[in-house]
Image (tube, rainbow, N blue to C red):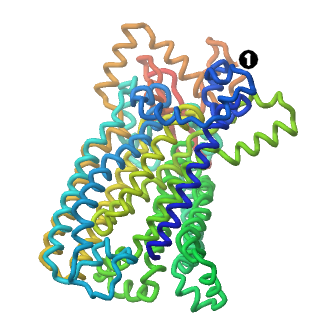
């Protein structure tokens, strides 16, 4: 791809974003569209409308574009987001902020230091045309054995250490306090039976998060379900290689002309070849990718997760690794190493060199991918085009009385987090190789930050709360990105005949892996285990305030199975008010898995998975 194709892609995407955002700012002012653009606010307070909704329907101001919502996104505080939308929503915003804090300084260093070093190198062949070759701005323009590579080596250390520093600072974002119970905290962290598979204890999800139908699946059968999900996901990943390879073929017009001679007619129309090679590949790829998260969500449904949050977190990981394999690695392979795949498997030690060669030649494609996924993708996300069209059809077909029903959906974490993380991964890999990519990534992150602040506050509702358990997954994704950057640079230094730099990069790789293990030991348990000290303090506080019995009754009602939630079972004196099957993970009540009540009072949840029987049940006890 040449500079003209890249310019065509950037122009088209920027123009499309501007048009879509103007339309959004106008559509959002129309009272009839409140069910689409202010669904979350309407669900909480039907009278919560901005002043413009109370004006005359034909007011001229309603048809003037405005961008007040952009300023509001930068004024909102994290405390407001966590209080109103929950910690999981805040984790998504912190992901965008992490990327912005990481890549803004890296962009400055890259543009002011690395790009001039690359462009002014006179050690490559004079046949390279600087004005038309994108490689002139990358490390590819540096000759073998050049001392300029020490600048890249220094920047690699700076970027890696800065990324690890930011990652270490972000972990406390998900540290929360629980109104838990001492017995629940102890039991959830200990083995309950000499047979570890007879009783498997784990904290339970919130009542609204439970998938009741999956609780009856025997534990032994879950392995079969998980294996089936892995097989289906693997088949989908393999078949997805076909469109990715085809997309890379479109990106390389010379290959198309060899395989399909009539394609030479594209060059007869001025500018058409730039549009085809610059915009069409990334557009086609993103169109296929859009359906992947929903397909993976269906596949994760085969695993019979006990809660929606677990199901979506598994989907999140599956989608990320799918994108890592198909969007990143397969795009590299099909673009420049298709003939060397066999050699890579035969000689795995040469993988860093192959990766380095591929990365340095595919920077232009990933720029267009970020432009399409970010600029066009985020703008279409805020416009909610499909939902808006359905709203117009529904209003016209079923009458205007249906317009007051808001379209409420939960935030698709499994779609947002993987796509943002894969773009951060691309930015990390190219931070030293092709730093001119980073400004595009910063714009991508800024736009995503503004868009999802608006969506979280006005559109999406909170359907469950995991207390930030998405962050350990994000941490792993970012560490993978840092490791890939370092492995790529090891290969590049080897290709550029700088063995000393290669050797000196290995300690940095080891340091990154040790840092990851340190974080797992120190911080990861906080996301999944409840402090016994906090449990005791909250028990004592409830006893002093006399709220222990109230919490017990609340737990009983919240975790009663749907078929037990009948009016005639509400008698407080009846033993049938205590649920036989229940499950719980709450911000205010910790839960355990157990089979018999304690005598001290309090609300705990007990769960039992019997691998030797035909049934699996989650038992909730009302007394501790």
**Viewed as shown, does residue 23 lie left or right of 82?**
right
- To which quarter of the image does residue 587 belong? top left
Residue 469 vertical placement versus 181 (above, below): below
Tell me the quarter of the image containing the C terminus.
top left
**Residue 484 or 399: which is nearer the viewer?**
399
Q: Residue 531, position in %: x, y?
A: 31, 31
Q: Is residue 612 visible?
A: no
Give x and y (percent) for residue 489: 25, 71
The residue lying toward the viewer, choosing from 277 and 298, is: 277
| Residue 566 vertical position relative to residue 526 in the rendered view, above or below | above
SS of the residue under disc 1: helix
Density class for disc 1 (Cα within 10 Å; few <14, some 14-19, many ≥20) is few
At a point 39% along the width and 31% down the height, the residue shown is 78
Please give the residue where the numbered disc 1 appears in the rendered image. Answer: 568
| 464 relative position to 421: left or right | right
Residue 314 at least partly seen: yes
- Closest to the observer, 90 or 212: 90
Q: Is residue 317 above or below residue 133?
A: above
What residue sits 50% from the left and 18% below the top? 552
Using the rendered view, name the quadrant where residue 21 is placed.
Answer: top right
Residue 509 shown left or right of residue 220 in the figure: left
Image spot of residue 5 (x, y percent): 50, 72
Residue situated in front as seen by the camera: 524 or 126: 126
Residue 17 lies, with reference to residue 176, above or below; the image says below
Residue at the (43%, 82%) spot, across then down: 336
């Amino acid at each position: 791809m040449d500079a003209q194709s890249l310019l065509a892609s950037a122009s088209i995407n920027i123009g499309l974003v501007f048009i879509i955002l103007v339309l959004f700012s106008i559509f959002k002012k129309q009272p009839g569209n409140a069910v689409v653009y202010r669904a979350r606010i309407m669900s909480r307070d039907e009278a919560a409308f901005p002043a413009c909704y109370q004006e005359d329907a034909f007011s001229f101001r309603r048809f003037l574009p405005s961008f007040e919502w952009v300023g509001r996104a930068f004024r909102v505080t994290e405390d407001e987001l966590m209080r109103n939308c929950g910690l999981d929503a805040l984790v998504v915003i912190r992901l965008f902020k992490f990327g912005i804090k990481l890549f803004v300084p890296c962009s400055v260093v890259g543009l002011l230091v690395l790009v001039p070093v690359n462009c002014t190198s006179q050690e490559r062949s004079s046949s390279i045309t600087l004005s038309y070759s994108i490689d002139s701005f990358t490390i590819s323009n540096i000759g073998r054995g050049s001392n300029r590579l020490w600048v890249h080596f220094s920047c690699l250390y700076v970027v890696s250490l800065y990324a690890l520093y930011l990652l270490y600072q972000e972990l406390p974002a998900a540290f929360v306090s629980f109104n838990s119970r001492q017995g629940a905290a102890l039991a959830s962290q200990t083995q309950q039976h000499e047979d570890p598979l007879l009783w498997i204890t784990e904290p339970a999800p919130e009542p609204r998060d439970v998938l009741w139908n999956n609780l009856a699946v025997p534990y032994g059968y879950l392995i079969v379900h998980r294996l089936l999900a892995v097989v289906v996901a693997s088949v989908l990943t393999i078949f997805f290689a076909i469109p990715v390879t085809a997309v890379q073929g479109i990106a390389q017009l010379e290959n198309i002309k060899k395989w399909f001679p009539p394609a030479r007619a594209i060059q007869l129309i001025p500018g058409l070849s730039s549009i085809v090679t610059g915009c069409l590949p990334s557009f086609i790829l993103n169109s296929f990718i859009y359906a992947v998260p929903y397909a993976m969500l269906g596949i994760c449904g085969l695993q019979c997760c006990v809660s929606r949050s677990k199901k979506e977190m598994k989907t999140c990981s599956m989608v990320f690794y799918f994108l890592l394999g198909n969007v990143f690695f397969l795009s590299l392979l099909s673009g420049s190493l298709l003939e060397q795949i066999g050699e890579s498997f035969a000689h795995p030690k040469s993988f860093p060199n192959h990766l380095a060669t591929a990365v340095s030649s595919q920077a232009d494609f990933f720029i267009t991918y970020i432009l399409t996924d970010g600029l066009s993708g985020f703008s279409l996300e805020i416009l909610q085009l499909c939902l808006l069209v359905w709203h117009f059809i529904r209003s016209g077909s079923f009458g205007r009385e249906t317009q007051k029903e808001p379209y409420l959906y939960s935030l698709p974490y499994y779609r947002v987090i993987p796509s943002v993380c894969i773009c951060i991964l691309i930015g990390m890999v190219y931070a030293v190789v092709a730093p001119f990519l980073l400004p595009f990534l910063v714009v991508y992150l800024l736009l995503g930050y503004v868009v999802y602040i608006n969506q979280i506050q006005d559109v999406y509702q909170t359907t469950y709360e995991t207390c930030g358990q998405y962050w350990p997954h994000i941490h792993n994704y970012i560490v993978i990105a840092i490791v890939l950057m370092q492995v790529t640079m090891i290969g590049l230094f080897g290709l550029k005949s700088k063995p000393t730099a290669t050797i000196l990069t290995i300690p940095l790789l080891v340091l990154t892996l040790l840092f990851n293990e340190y974080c797992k030991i120190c911080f990861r348990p906080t996301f999944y285990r409840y402090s016994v000290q906090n449990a005791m303090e909250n028990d004592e506080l409830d006893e002093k305030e006399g709220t222990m019995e109230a919490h017990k009754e609340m737990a009983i009602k919240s975790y009663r199975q749907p078929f037990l939630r009948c009016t005639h079972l509400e008698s407080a004196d009846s033993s049938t008010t205590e649920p036989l099957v229940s499950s719980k993970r709450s911000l205010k009540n910790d839960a355990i898995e157990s089979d018999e009540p304690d005598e001290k009072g309090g609300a705990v949840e007990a769960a039992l998975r019997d691998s030797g029987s035909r049934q699996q049940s989650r038992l909730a006890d009302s007394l501790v």
